Amino acid sequence: MRTYGQYCAVAKALDVVGDRWTLLIVRELLTLGPCRYTDLREGLPGIATNLLAIRLRELEDSGLVRREDAPPPVATTLFSLTERGQRLLPVLQELGRWGAPLVAKRARSDQFRAHWMSLPLGWHLIDLTPEAAPATIELRVGEQRLTITASGGATRTRPGRAANPDLVLSGGPDLVAGLLLGWFDLETVRARGLRIHGDSSVLNRLGRRTPGSIGAITQE
Amino acid sequence: MRTYGQYCAVAKALDVVGDRWTLLIVRELLTLGPCRYTDLREGLPGIATNLLAIRLRELEDSGLVRREDAPPPVATTLFSLTERGQRLLPVLQELGRWGAPLVAKRARSDQFRAHWMSLPLGWHLIDLTPEAAPATIELRVGEQRLTITASGGATRTRPGRAANPDLVLSGGPDLVAGLLLGWFDLETVRARGLRIHGDSSVLNRLGRRTPGSIGAITQE
DNA sequence: CGGCATCCTCTTTGATACTG
DNA sequence: CAGTATCAAAGAGGATGCCG
């Protein structure tokens, strides 16, 4: 392991998580929870398989990742974050906030996985009517699904399809993210091809947590 | 520039600041303010000089760093952070918080610069008596000096010596940091060799911002 | 001196093929 | 499924030279 050799907390942190791909592996584990080697590879397009194996071992040695052999019927190795690894969430959150302007436009060559929106949406969206019964929205981007649940004032986002969604939004990642993160309003994304099925009034229930202000999705 | 090619804010952020040394250069610029190439090299022991030049150009191209030719009598190039670059402060803050446990013990080979404590101390220390007149503490670690000013409820920390310090703390980095960040109490660091000159009651004025609790330095 | 550029070596990363 | 093995390319580290 190459180290900066500096008696400084930032440098020490980067000694552990500063290598290429490392924080993206943590992103996957934070988003997906315990998962298999192949799930990780799926969510990390571009990584070389040997590098993923090396990084996982390093993360294990640093105490950020735990490897368990799941019992039958799963019968496979599961990787998950330790408590220490989970504490990297605020680091990823700040990196994501800082990087948000960089995803305003999508490059043609950019890969996309719907679950990458999971953490940012969870941070950004709030439930404006905490008293109401839980509501679910399913996002469809290509074949991939993501489920947002609004309940008790907060929202939770997880990979996969919803059982009984109140609303379904289908379209490209820039349209879906653009609407929910507040780059575009409802009319704009609809005009650009976003498809909306179900009870669109659910959108009024979602608010955006912006630095200093909170607004409903359809406002602005 | 190598890119992850992922439509994800975290990955995009790492495309810009994920390269080796990049965030440490930002640390230096945040801590020191506008400074010269040689000042940066001084604060980044271990960096190859050509790599510093390359990184500075990349940071300039990404719009995080500005290069200005200072007028006489300085007559040298000054590097400073743009607004966009300064917004990386929360990222460094979370990285530093996460990395804090890793500097509990100092490795023999670890380099040290007093100004590396500047950002963490500024985040961590608060002024418990906002009404009182400003107080200053000078830290001496080897030949290096750092000045802490407590005033109006907050503390500010900057590199360099104090004009008229109320208190001077001298000793190794682990002792100075250990006392101020709350790893050790006053008796312990004194027993281990920390030297204290001046009005040590100033320490009672400083509180630590810990997750959930605030305590005076000499407590606990 | 300050601010690099060059040259060289060594390490890390990437791509691909293969295996228990 | 969960990797290892191999090889080529890119990046980092170190020494030194150059130029205003």
Image (spheres, coloured by chain):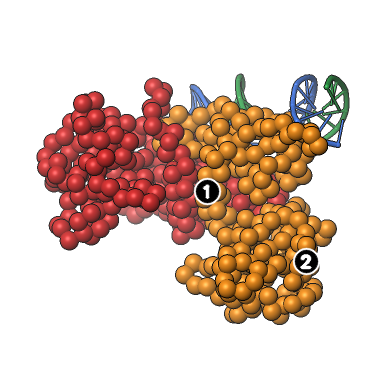
Chain colours: A red, B orange, C blue, D green
Q: Nearer the viewer, residue A196 or B33?
A: B33
Residue type (three-letter) at the residue carrying disc 1: Val
Residue drawn at x 58%, y 28% as measured from the top left: B61
- Residue B214 as seen in the image, left or right of residue B205: left
Give how far across and how far down residue B132 sits, in percent. Answer: 61, 74
Quarter of the image where the N terminus of chain B is located: top right
Q: Which residue is mark 2?
A: B164
- Single out the residue that lies furthest toward the left: A198
Residue drawn at x 60%, y 80% as measured from the top left: B219
Give how far across and how far down residue B40 sits, in percent. Answer: 72, 41
Give how far across and how far down residue A118 sits, in percent. Answer: 33, 44
Q: Which residue is mark 1?
A: B91
Q: Which mark is residue A183?
A: none
Q: Nearer the viewer, residue B6 or C11?
A: B6
Quarter of the image where the C terminus of chain B is located: bottom right
For discs 1 and 2, the disc positioned in front in the rendered view: 2
